[in-house]
Image (tube, helix red, strand yellow):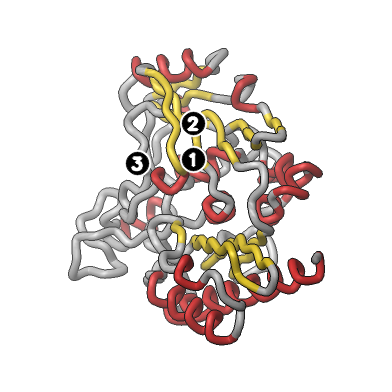
């Protein structure tokens, strides 16, 4: 059953320490940012938290500073602010393109950086109403014991469909995480694992405080495949950061979303460096992408189409960035 509105409480802590303390003191509590993912899921009966900890208004989470040594973006900064910031657009085009590609203006005005990084994984058998899921015997991700995508196994294949994560991965981002025991930093890639049931590695009560970026990343871009030109989550998405110097490919990072249970950096791109960006390199890159993505029947589009399409998106971004870099020189 869907939990009635009065089934949980909402608190608004003044700072990060108070937020983590509230979480530690109330089992079953959840952090709330913009609510564009969590509240929708709660309306569908996906979860019954005992307490919502509203993070809006915590000043530390809303800071944004672009400095010579790097950039720090608070976890509560909205996607609209990211997309419109001129300094971010100059340094990190992929990030701003990804932020601008999320849903529509109303969503971007409230959706936050950490919220997009921590999106729940998605599947056509999971993101449905309570009565639909009940009529279809639920699924392994919530209240069921069978993954309808792959019934013979015991693994949830729900896909991560956030837009910011691949852009930040390609740009070499790290995150700062807070809990009652203290704070720690880690590469963004370590936030995720390939598990549709539990794709985040955060310990209970841990809260993302900020994202940190290097000051001079390679030129970058982001693109995604979706049915409609706006609103939709990515069925497959890719971010590329590359640098071409004196006719040689000297830096290449490719990150993908929408195809696996985690966003991930493509392995093997280092082997393509120190030579010209020619047809052979593009062909090798195409093979790397198609081998490492794992699209399953979690959307209405065929899996193989998504596999081929994301490889094509990758190729287009690489060619575009390489041409832009050559012209700039």
Residue at point 37% right, 59% down? 158
Can residue 226 be seen here? The reply is: no
Q: Is residue 268 above or below residue 25?
A: below
Can residue 295 be seen here? The reply is: yes
The residue closer to the viewer here, 2 or 193, is 193
Q: CA distance from mark 1 to mark 2?
A: 22 Å
Residue at point 73% right, 44% down? 88
Give the number of the mark in front: 3 or 2: 2
Give the number of the mark in front: 1 or 3: 3
Q: Position of residue 150 (x, y in %)?
A: 26, 69
Q: Is residue 17 above or below residue 171?
A: above
Q: Position of residue 89 (x, y in %)?
A: 76, 49
**Quadrant holding the C terminus:** bottom right
Residue position marked by numbered label 1 in the rendering: 38
Residue position marked by numbered label 2 in the rendering: 176
Answer with mark 1 or mark 2, whichever residue precedes in sequence: 1
Label annotation for residue 201: 3
* Element class at badge 2: strand
């Amino acid at each position: 059953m869907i939990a009635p509105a009065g089934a949980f409480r909402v608190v608004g802590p003044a700072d990060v320490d108070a937020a983590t303390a509230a979480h530690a003191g109330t089992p079953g509590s959840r952090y709330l940012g913009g609510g564009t993912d969590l509240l929708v899921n709660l309306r569908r009966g996906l979860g019954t938290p005992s307490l919502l900890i509203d993070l809006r208004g915590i000043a530390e989470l809303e800071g944004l500073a672009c400095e010579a040594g790097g950039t720090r973006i608070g976890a509560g900064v909205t996607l609209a602010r990211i997309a419109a910031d001129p300094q971010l657009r100059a340094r990190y085009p992929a990030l701003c393109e990804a932020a601008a590609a999320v849903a529509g203006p109303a969503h971007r005005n409230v959706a936050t950086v950490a919220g997009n990084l921590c999106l729940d994984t998605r599947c056509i058998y999971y993101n449905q109403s309570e009565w639909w899921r009940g009529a279809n015997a639920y699924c392994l991700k919530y209240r069921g014991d069978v993954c309808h995508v792959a019934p013979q196994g015991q693994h949830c294949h729900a896909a991560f469909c956030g837009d910011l994560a691949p852009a930040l991965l390609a740009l070499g981002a790290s995150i700062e995480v807070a809990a009652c025991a203290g704070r720690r930093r880690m590469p963004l890639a370590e936030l995720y694992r390939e598990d549709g049931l539990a794709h985040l590695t955060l310990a209970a009560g841990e809260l993302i405080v900020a994202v940190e970026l290097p000051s001079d990343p390679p030129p970058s871009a982001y693109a995604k495949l979706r049915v409609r030109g706006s609103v939709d989550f990515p069925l497959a998405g890719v971010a590329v950061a590359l640098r071409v110097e004196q006719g040689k490919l000297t830096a290449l990072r490719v990150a993908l979303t929408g195809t696996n249970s985690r966003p991930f950096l493509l392995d093997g791109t280092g082997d393509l460096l120190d030579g010209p960006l020619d047809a052979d390199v593009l062909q090798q890159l195409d093979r790397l992408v198609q081998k490492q993505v794992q699209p399953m029947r979690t959307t209405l589009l065929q899996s193989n189409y998504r596999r081929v399409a994301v490889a094509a998106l990758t190729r287009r971004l690489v060619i575009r960035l390489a041409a832009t870099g050559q012209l700039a020189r």
